[in-house]
Image: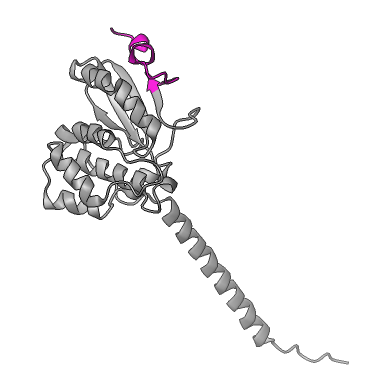
Amino acid sequence: MATAARKTNWFAIWISVGVVVVLVGVVAIVALLNSRATDPGPVPASSGINRETGAITFGKGPDKVSTYVDFMCPYCGQFEAAEGKEIASLVDEGKITLEVHPVTILDRLSQGTEYSSRAASAFYAVAEADPANSYAFFRALYDNQPKEQTPGLTDDELITLAKDSGVTMTAKLEKTIKDHEYVGFAQAQKLPEGATGTPTLMVNDKIVPVTYDPKADILANLTSR
């Protein structure tokens, strides 16, 4: 006895196709969200800014001094007060190459304004637009450092501080600061391996415990004195 021809279950087929389409869509959305989460956004363009490490470089000396700092960190402020003048002198004398790495680990301590990120973004913007005066702006950020658990400086105050530091404030630079253009790039920067917080000091690529004494922390570790 011959068997009857099987009927095609189109309903089941279309259901299966629909499930596949939905799964493909979900995978695409997840991939897009992951991409956005890891995309640092606009990257500052300047010969003095390392686009891979985030370091802003000052000077061309034989020894390398690297600092990892957060503009809201009070210990970074103490470090700058104790050692900043000596560091600046070493840069001016051509004895060191200084690499400043802004990091943004203390955004949670600025009442929702993300001051660490905004200040770092402004620093990158200034380093891109007016590198000759960016180190003066860096020093001014610590001379006028806000306390933790405060909103920090406003964007307009950051702009005024840059102007007072000698930075040429163009309309483009002002917009870059107010638009927080480099916040994503700043937030993508990390502490080096082995670091536990800020400030982190490295001399010739070796982490040096900070004692707030420039003779012990920096001068004693230079290869050319």
In the image, residue 35 sits, relative to residue 117, either above or below, namely below
Given residues 83 and 182, the one toward you in this image is 83
Residue at 51% of width from left, 61% of height from top?
A: 30
Q: Which residues are magenta?
A: 202-225
Residue at 33% of width from left, 52% of height from top?
A: 41
In the image, residue 74 sits, relative to residue 109, either above or below, namely above
Relative to 172, is 190 on the left or the right?
right
Q: Quadrant of residue 203?
A: top left
Residue at 19% of width from left, 15% of height from top?
A: 93
Residue 199: x and y, percent? Answer: 40, 29
Would residue 129 be visible to someone looking at this image? no
Residue 31: x and y, percent? Answer: 49, 59
Quadrant including the C terminus: top left
Residue 174: x and y, percent? Answer: 17, 51
Given residues 188 and 140, the one toward you in this image is 140
Quadrant including the N terminus: bottom right
Residue 221 highlighted magenta (yes or no): yes
Residue 65: x and y, percent? Answer: 33, 21
In the image, residue 77 sits, relative to residue 202, either above or below, namely below
Residue 1 highlighted magenta (yes or no): no
Tell me, what colour scheme is on the image? Answer: one colour
Would residue 88 be visible to someone looking at this image? yes
Relative to 195, is 110 on the left or the right?
left
Residue at 38% of width from left, 15% of height from top?
A: 217
Residue at the limit of the structure toward the right, as seen here: 1
Q: Quadrant of residue 134?
A: top left
